[in-house]
Image (spheres, grey):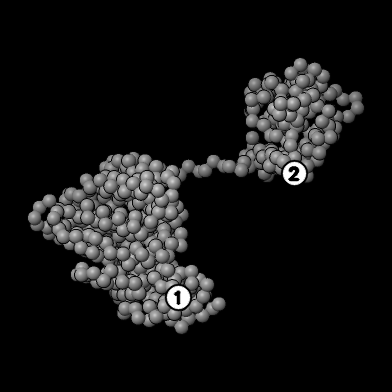
C-alpha cells in the first residue's frame, strides 16, 4: 500500500452480486463522497464491452489500491460453486489473493449473515479479517475502519522505536527483580494487604540491589564517581514508576514515601569500621536528593497537595551517625537537601562544562536526568524552588531535636528555571486557593494568610558572583498576602 496515499485519490474496485446492488451503490456513493475513486461496473461497463475483461482488468490493475469483496448469501453460493459472473470474478480474484499480489489489497465486506448468524463469505476469504456492514448498529464503526484501511490511517498505529532503557546497558546491577515486583504491584487491587506487602518487598529488594555500591573505590577518581551516578538513574526511574503505581492504587502515599526514604537512608549509610572521615555516602545522598525532588514533581503533577504537605512535615526516623549501632532519631526532610562537597569542591574544577564551573555541577547533572513526560528539567527546577519557598512556611525540621546545619531548603537548580511564578500567582484566584490549601496544612484562606504572615525569614538565598547574582525567587516576590484569594 502506498504510504503517501493521503496525497492522491485512492482507487477501489467493488466485486459484488447483483442481488445486493442497492447496498453496493449506496456504499459506492458514500465512498466517493469521502474522496475515494470507485470502480464499479454500473459506472464503468458500457453496452458491447466484455464483462469478463472488465473484471480481470479491474482486479489486476496495479492502480487499484483495494478490491472490496461485498459478500451476501448469493455471492457466497456463486463464488463457492464458481457460477455466473461472481464465479468468473472468483476465478480471477483467487489466484491474485494467493499469488504475488499483496494480500491486504483484498478486503472482504460482510453484507449479510446466514440463518445461524455467521458472516456470509466465500471459502477462499472466510478466514481473513473483514469489515462487517451487515448491521445498522455497527455500520458506522465498521465503515470508519474501512475508510482508515483504504487511506492507510489505522486507529491504532505502531509507536516509533525509542531508546533502550538505561538499565539495559548497566553491567553492575540486575534490576529485573524490582521490575517484576512493579508489574505485580501494578496488577493489584487498590489498597489491599497484598499491595502493601508488594510495596514493602519492592523497597527491600530495591535497597538490596543498591547495597553493593557501598564501597570506597567509588571516590578514588571522578570517573568512578560519575559512572555510579549515571548507573543510579535507572534506580531513580524505577522509584518514580513505583510512586506512580502507589498513587494510582490509592495507597497511603505519605506512609509509603516516608518508609522508602527512611529505609533507603538507614540501610545505605553504614560503615564497617569505627572511624569515618568525610562523607563516604555522597553518591547515595545524590540518589536520595534527586528522588525526593522527583517525588514532589510527580505529586504536583497529580495534584496530591495534602500528601505533599504530609511528606514535608513528616518526622523521618534516621540514624544519627554512619556506625552500625547508631541511635535512630526523628529528623525532617531538610536532611535530604545536601551540599555535595565532593561534587562541587573536588570534581567540579575538573568538569568540562563552563556552566558547572560557574555555579553547580550537581544541579546541572540533575536537570539533564529527565524522565518525560512528567519529570522534565523545568519541572525539576520548579519543584526544587517550591521546596525552598515552602521551607519558610512549613517546618521541614519537624520540630525535632536534630542538630540541623540549616532549616531552609537550598534550591540548587533554581538558576535553570525559566518560569517560577505560575503556581503562586494563581493563588489570587479564590477557587484555586481553596483547592491548594491542603499543601499548606490549613483549611481556610484566613489560616493560610496567617501562616504565611508568621513564616520564617524570607531573605535572599542563591549563588552570588561577579557574573551571576540572581537569587532564588522568594514567595513574597511573587504574591503579597493581601493578594491571596482576592479574585473570586
Q: Residue at x 67, y 40 (%)?
A: 145
> Residue extending furthest right?
47
Q: Residue at x 81, y 32 (%)?
A: 40
Residues at discs 1 and 2 in contact (Cβ within 8 Å): no
The residue wearing badge 2 is 35
Of pointers 1 and 2, the one earlier in the residue sequence: 2
Is 276 left, or right, of 374 in this rendering?
left
Above or below 306: residue 201: above
Above or below 239: residue 96: above
Label 2: state its secondary structure.
loop
Label 1: state its secondary structure.
loop
> Residue extending furthest bottom?
482
Above or below 103: residue 438: below
> Residue extending furthest left?
274
Residue 369: percent from left, percent from top: 37, 55
Residue 425: percent from left, percent from top: 47, 74
User: Which of the 4 image quadrants contains residue 399?
Assistant: bottom left
Is 450 left, or right, of 340 in this rendering?
right
Q: CA distance from mark 1 to mark 2?
A: 59 Å
Q: Residue at x 46, y 54 (%)?
A: 373
Is 191 left, or right, of 403 in this rendering?
right
Quadrant of the drawing holding the N terminus = top right
Q: Which of the pair 106/285 is nearer the observer?
A: 285
Q: Residue at x 24, y 60 (%)?
A: 317
Q: Which of the pair 405/380 is nearer the observer?
A: 405
Residue 162 visible:
yes
Residue 398: percent from left, percent from top: 28, 69
Label 1 crowd (10 A; few <14 / some 14-19 / many >=20): few
Residue 61: percent from left, percent from top: 73, 28
What label sits on residue 444 in the rendered view? 1
> Residue extending furthest front?
193
Amino acid at each position: 500500500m502506498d504510504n503517501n496515499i493521503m496525497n492522491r485519490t485512492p482507487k477501489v474496485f467493488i466485486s459484488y452480486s447483483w442481488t445486493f446492488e442497492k447496498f453496493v451503490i449506496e456504499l459506492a456513493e458514500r465512498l466517493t463522497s469521502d474522496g475515494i475513486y470507485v470502480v464499479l461496473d454500473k459506472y464503468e461497463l458500457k453496452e458491447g464491452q466484455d464483462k469478463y475483461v472488465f473484471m480481470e482488468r479491474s482486479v489486476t490493475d496495479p492502480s487499484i489500491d483495494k478490491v472490496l469483496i461485498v459478500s451476501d448469501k448469493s455471492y457466497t453460493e456463486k463464488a463457492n460453486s464458481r457460477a455466473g459472473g461472481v464465479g468468473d470474478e472468483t476465478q480471477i480474484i483467487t489466484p491474485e489473493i494467493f499469488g504475488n499480489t499483496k494480500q491486504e489489497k483484498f478486503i472482504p465486506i460482510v453484507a449479510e449473515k446466514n440463518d445461524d448468524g455467521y458472516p456470509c463469505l466465500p471459502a477462499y476469504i472466510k478466514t481473513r479479517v473483514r469489515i462487517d456492514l451487515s448491521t445498522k448498529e455497527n455500520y458506522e464503526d465498521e465503515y470508519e475502519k474501512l475508510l482508515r484501511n483504504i487511506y492507510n490511517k489505522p486507529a491504532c498505529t505502531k509507536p516509533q522505536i525509542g531508546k533502550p532503557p538505561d538499565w539495559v546497558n548497566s553491567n553492575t546491577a540486575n534490576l529485573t527483580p524490582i521490575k517484576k515486583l512493579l508489574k505485580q504491584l501494578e496488577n493489584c487491587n487498590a489498597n489491599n494487604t497484598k499491595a502493601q506487602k508488594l510495596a514493602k518487598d519492592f523497597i527491600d529488594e530495591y535497597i538490596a540491589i543498591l547495597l553493593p555500591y557501598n564501597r570506597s573505590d567509588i571516590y578514588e577518581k571522578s570517573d568512578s564517581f560519575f559512572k555510579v551516578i549515571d548507573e543510579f538513574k535507572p534506580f531513580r526511574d524505577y522509584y518514580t514508576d513505583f510512586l506512580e503505581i502507589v498513587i494510582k492504587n490509592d495507597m497511603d502515599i505519605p506512609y509509603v514515601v516516608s518508609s522508602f526514604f527512611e529505609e533507603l537512608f538507614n540501610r545505605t549509610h553504614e560503615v564497617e569500621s569505627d572511624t569515618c572521615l568525610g562523607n563516604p555516602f555522597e553518591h547515595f545522598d545524590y540518589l536520595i536528593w534527586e528522588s525526593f525532588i522527583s517525588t514532589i514533581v510527580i505529586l504536583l503533577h497529580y495534584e496530591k497537595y495534602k500528601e505533599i504537605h504530609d511528606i514535608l512535615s513528616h518526622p523521618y526516623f534516621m540514624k544519627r551517625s554512619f556506625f552500625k549501632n547508631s541511635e535512630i532519631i526523628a529528623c525532617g526532610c531538610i536532611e535530604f537537601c545536601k551540599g555535595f562537597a565532593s561534587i562541587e569542591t573536588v570534581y567540579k574544577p575538573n568538569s568540562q562544562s563552563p556552566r558547572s564551573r560557574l555555579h553547580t555541577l550537581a544541579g546541572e547533572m540533575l536537570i539533564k536526568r529527565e524522565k518525560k513526560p512528567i519529570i522534565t528539567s523545568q519541572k525539576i527546577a520548579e519543584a526544587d524552588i517550591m521546596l525552598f519557598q515552602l521551607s519558610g512556611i512549613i517546618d521541614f525540621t519537624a520540630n525535632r531535636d536534630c542538630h540541623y546545619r540549616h532549616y531552609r531548603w537550598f534550591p540548587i537548580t533554581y538558576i535553570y528555571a525559566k518560569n517560577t511564578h505560575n503556581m503562586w500567582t494563581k493563588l489570587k484566584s479564590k477557587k484555586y486557593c481553596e483547592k491548594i490549601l491542603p499543601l499548606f496544612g490549613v483549611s481556610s484562606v484566613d489560616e493560610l494568610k496567617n501562616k504565611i504572615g508568621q513564616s520564617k525569614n524570607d531573605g535572599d538565598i542563591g549563588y552570588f558572583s561577579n557574573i551571576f547574582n540572581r537569587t532564588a525567587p522568594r514567595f513574597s516576590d511573587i504574591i503579597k498576602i493581601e493578594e491571596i484569594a482576592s479574585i473570586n
